[in-house]
Image: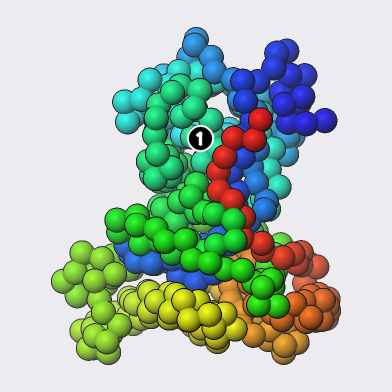
Amino acid sequence: MSVADEFTALYGYAPQGVWAAPGRVNLIGEYTDFNEGFVMPLALPHTAVAAVARRDDGLLRLHSADVEGPVVELAADALRPLSDSGGWAAYPAGVVWALRAAGHPVGGADLHLSSTVPTGAGLSSSAALEVVTALALNELYELGLTKRELALLAQRAENAFVGVPCGVMDQMASAACEAGRVLHLDCRDLGVRQVPFDLAAHGLRLLVVDTRVRHELGDGAYAERRAGCEAGARALGVTHLRDVLYAELPDALRQLDDERVRRYVRHVVSDDHRVARVVALLDAGDVRGIGPVLTEGHASLRDDLRISCPELNLAVAAAERAGALGARMTGGGFGGSAVALVEAADADTVTKAVTEAFAAAGFTPPRVFEAEPSRGARRVA
């Protein structure tokens, strides 16, 4: 049964449309977005799909095919940040709140959602829910908002309504990525460049290893890193760490007394530099050359930012031992996923090696799949 048919069975009438928004995997540039730095995400083929109809009575009804439970009913004019809006339902509800708070005339809606984006895997399942909701309401209420504006409102929903102080990368990737390309995003002005990333043409694949270790970014660890980065920027006299040039990093580190803040600053400034290196390599047609840069990024996330975990470290190490050109954890950390750049001929070998390494360590079997650069949010019916 399609999502539209499920909507009809649930609410007793047909939806006005069906929209989809993808999850994302980040190739390089981690914890740089809220520092107004640079990132390089690509959209996954995995999407959150929403069948939606407008309501004019101010009632918001939300249902997920993926979560057991009844329809969540909320009054649009009673939505309040950081309130209990039904767990997963906080993400679409937060979008309604953010749209209304920005002055857009959004009333109620009936939504039925289904997602193939793994939750808690560092692949932006929450951003996909937010962006698909924003896209649907933008069209149904004829708001005329751009993808950039929708991404910012979705980020506002997650920051202020749900309470996760994320940057804008996830929402921009879900809204604006293009098939066959990786998004080079400047998180200061949201300038974008769609960089060709045709792995198949180079005989390569990008594997995602979902460790199935579920993270929870609302637990304070993410917020602590963000606060540490902000403290580093203040100590260095800059607005954001983006303003610290890589060539100036040794001098900047000597100005920081707090060892923890020093590590965070080193990671962010170095990862911004790694993004620039990856862009240069891709522009030169040296796709294989980005492998070592990914591996450097993992070491920084593991040792400086300290957001990795044994499963992620094992995924990276096992992939590289089996012939991966480079690998790193991706996303917010403390679980979630890793990516590995591999020769197409080695994909099965790397997958087998990672799976066997997890079994030998007594870890939950990982889920390994190919990341194909896919299209961003769009209407599908």
User: From the viewer's perspective, is 139 left or right of 312?
Assistant: left
Q: Residue at x 34, y 29 (%)?
A: 101
**Residue 34 visible in the current orientation:** no
Residue 5: where, in percent of width, then height? 77, 24
Residue beneath label 1, please?
A: 135
Residue 344: where, in percent of width, then height? 75, 77
Relative to 229, residue 65 above or below? above
Q: Amino acid under label 1?
A: Leu
Q: Quadrant of the C terminus?
A: top right
Which residue ends up furthest to the left in the rendered image?
237
Q: Residue at x 58, y 77 (%)?
A: 328
**Residue 29 visible in the current orientation:** yes
User: From the viewer's perspective, is 43 left or right of 11?
Assistant: left
Q: Quadrant of the N terminus?
A: top right
User: From the viewer's perspective, is 273 left or right of 371?
Assistant: left
Q: Quadrant of residue 197?
A: bottom right
Residue 92: where, in percent of width, then height? 53, 34
Judging depth in this view, the residue of 109 and 42 nearest the camera is 42
Which residue ends up furthest to the top in the rendered image?
57
User: From the viewer's perspective, is 199 left or right of 281?
Assistant: right
Crowd around label 1: few <14 · some 14–19 · many ≥20 (10 Å): many
Q: Residue at x 76, y 26 (%)?
A: 6
Q: Quadrant of residue 200?
A: bottom right
Residue 285: where, in percent of width, then height? 53, 80
Judging depth in this view, the residue of 368 and 254 nearest the camera is 368
